[in-house]
Amino acid sequence: MPARIITIANQKGGCGKTTVTMTLAGALAAQKLRVIVVDADRQGSASTWSANAPDDKPFPARVMNLAMAGKALGSEIRKFLDDADIILIDCPPAVDSPLPMQALVISDVVLVPLLPSPTDFAAAQTFFELINSSLNLNPSMQVRVVPNMVQKTALTNSYMEAVANLPFPRTQAEIGHRVSYKEAAALGCSVDELPGAAGSAKAEVKRLVAEILPLVGFEDALKTHKSKPRTPPKKTKQSAAQA
């Protein structure tokens, strides 16, 4: 079947669109799915993330820069529908650009990263209006708000309660405010590929993927994919003594 299209977009810059896009791309590729990332933002953050990968270990998903496509974005993306299982579109933070609307009208799912802050909640309202307009052209599109950069504070908790009153449902999975995501961007890898301790980030990404795959008809990928067994690290004399 042709690729399913997932757009990651919001009106406000700094809400973590690229982080959600590239994190999902790496995690979906780990499910043995063919993933293409379309970098539609002139800042080129997704392209930079991918370019940071070493030559001998490229980023697990293909990244294409179509930031200059303008109103031709939809037709350009359709050229690759048979080359992928899932196409992720990282949109620019501007509703006055033609790119977000072009992405919305061809999307199966739209993810709206949202920070728990008053300015982000206010800015999101404009983008929700754009989504409502695009639903007239693409009524089957599904929308989910993704709480991003979440911290466990009283202020954050109060804003998370306000998410329930937004016009579109939220994902139960939340993306935390973690250094692991910045490390993955710097190394050009997915969170799953990070060396060292990134267990909390990996767990929340796994929960997000488990919610997203059924929306695009790939829930079977979760059932058939088997993670490689983890080889426990060998104990050195120093670590044995510390134990």
Image (cartoon, rainbow, N blue to C red):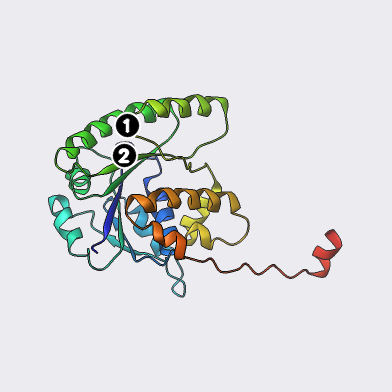
* Mark 1 secondary-structure assignment: helix
Residue at 38% x, 31% y: name it.
120
Mark 1 surroundings within 10 Å by alpha-carbon count, few (fewer than 14), some (14 through 19), many (20 or more): many
The answer, for residue 192, to whether it is visible in the render is yes
Residue tagged 2:
10
- Identify the image quadrant of residue 53: bottom left
Q: Residue 176: x percent and y percent?
A: 52, 42
* In-image side of 141 versus 208 (left or right): left
> Visible in this render: residue 26?
no
Residue sitting at x 36%, y 58%: 218
Q: Residue at x 47, y 59 (%)?
A: 190
Compare residues 200 and 209 and report the one nearer the observer: 209
- Secondary structure at badge 2 equals loop
Q: Position of residue 43 (x, y in %)?
A: 31, 50
Q: Residue 142 in the image: x percent, y percent?
A: 28, 43
Amino acid found under the numbered disc labelled 1: Ala
**Corner quadrant of residue 101:** top left
Question: Residue 144 location, x and y as percent?
Answer: 35, 40
Residue 187 to residue 108: above or below: below
Spatial CA distance of label 1 from label 2 is: 7 Å
Using a 10 Å C-alpha cutoff, classify the residue at mark 2 as few (fewer than 14 neighbours), some (14 to 19) or many (20 or more): many
Q: Residue furthest bottom?
A: 56
Q: Which mark is residue 197?
A: none
Choose the circle earlier in sequence order: 1 or 2.
2
Q: Is residue 198 left or right of residue 236?
A: left
Q: Quadrant of residue 195?
A: bottom right
Give the side of residue 168 with respect to residue 194, left or right: left
The amino acid beneath tag 2 is: Asn
Q: Residue furthest right?
A: 241
Q: Do tag 1 and tag 2 residues touch (Cβ < 8 Å)? A: yes
Of the 4 image quadrants, the one containing the N terminus is: bottom left
Residue picked out by circle 1: 124
